[in-house]
Amino acid sequence: MMSELALFDQVIDRSAMNSDKWDKYSNDVIPMWVADMDFDAPACVKTALQNRIQQGVFGYTHIPKALVAAIQTHLQTSYDWPISGTHLVHLPGLVCALHLSVQTFSLPGDTIVVPGPVYYHLTKAPEMAGRNLLSIKMTLQEGRWLPDWQAFEKACALSDSKMILLCNPHNPGGTVYRREELEVIHGLAQKYDLLVVSDEIHCDLILDDITHVPFASLNQDAAQRTITLMAPSKTYNLAGLGYAFAVIENTHLRQRFNQGRAGLIPVPNMLGLTAAQAAYEEGQVWHHSLITYLRTNRDYIVERLADTPLTVSHLEATYLAWIDASNLPVEDAYAFFLEAGVGVSPGKDFGDANFIRLNFGCSMSVLQQALYRIENAIRVLQKR
Ligand SMILES: Cc1ncc(COP(=O)(O)O)c(C=O)c1O
């Protein structure tokens, strides 16, 4: 039997899978953009799905009690966070919950505070709903991307500020907020009476020896003013199966969230529920190997790009390297690397055009090939 780590070395042909990631570019481009890994799903997930497909009847489905229990166990054992099953809201994705939260809990013209550059739906949700987006610039502070704390307080203090949208771990940049930092943010939320929507989708992808602290687990006040959004989709690469969940302890907030959802956001697909349950119940060994593999990939990128004009800041979490390309003498780093055969995400999608984001959730051999193309393109450029 192949070792778990060797499983990640396999290069899987995704060309016949209608993959967003692989079908965006022509065959001669290595796609390293959207947050989707190229790895085979854990065997436990595939077996659970096969068993469910084998049953052959696919009518309306309710949420399995065993899934609720698996989530509770996962949050308790991983984050020392006991939650009640009644506080869960099951969703077909996390993005819809970001938009729904903004639309349900703020009014047009209200200000929403968002540290960024950030995953674009955290800024799109306020913008699309006609809210006033106040982006707090994150800068490198002792090697970690953190918000400008003074600007953060100033924004929260505005009379029309209603909500903080937090991404923890942060995408891009990989910051895992420490307890003390979350306590500062909570202090602001409490002082200015703001709701916190905490997107924690990347919380099981921490590469350093740091523990994730769910914002809502900080204290009773935080629990009452927070909507926590999580999913197994990034960790186990199940995004195409559409399952995420919210934890909302405050009854009034949960009722309003559910009212906003009613008739518009469907219950999750049964296969998403099946996969999530299997991943949380049995995916621990696979997950452990994944983290080991990703850590090696992350460190390899830093090593290989060390002598180039690209600056790779240390990534505490996620498989999305946030790379400063401002020293590269080109107009558009994204277009430059695309021309060289590597399809990264342009930094401007997240709010900083000087950067590119490179997804290293792939086998080492693919990563090596991509880095070779990147290095080679830079070498040719430097010789000109
Ligand atoms: C921070 C963050 N939130 C949400 C999502 C997407 O969530 P979903 O696919 O469940 O809508 C992503 C995907 O990359 C993400 O990085």
Image (tube, helix red, strand yellow):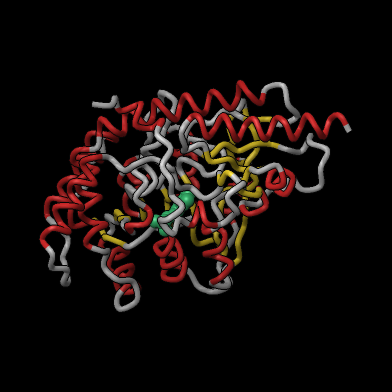
The answer to whether residue 30 of the structure is visible from this angle is yes
Q: Quadrant of the N terminus?
A: top left
The relative height of residue 229 versus residue 39 in the rendered view (above or below) is: below
Q: Quadrant of the C terminus?
A: top right
* The furthest residue to the bottom: 263
Q: Which of 18 and 162 lies nearest the eye of the viewer?
A: 18
Q: Quadrant of residue 371?
A: top right
Residue 145: x and y in percent read 59, 36
222 left or right of 178? left
Q: Residue at x 52, y 59 (%)?
A: 121
Count of marks placed on residues:
0
79 left or right of 368? left
153 left or right of 14? right
Residue 308: x and y in percent read 73, 26
Residue 25: x and y in percent read 59, 54
Q: Residue at x 42, y 56 (%)?
A: 16
The answer to whether residue 196 of the structure is visible from this angle is no
Q: Residue at x 75, y 29 (%)?
A: 309
Residue 270: x and y in percent read 21, 62
* The furthest residue to the right: 384
Q: Which of 61 and 216 lies nearest the eye of the viewer?
A: 61
Q: Which of 37 and 85 lies nearest the eye of the viewer?
A: 37
7 left or right of 114? left
Q: Which of 89 and 43 lies nearest the eye of the viewer?
A: 43
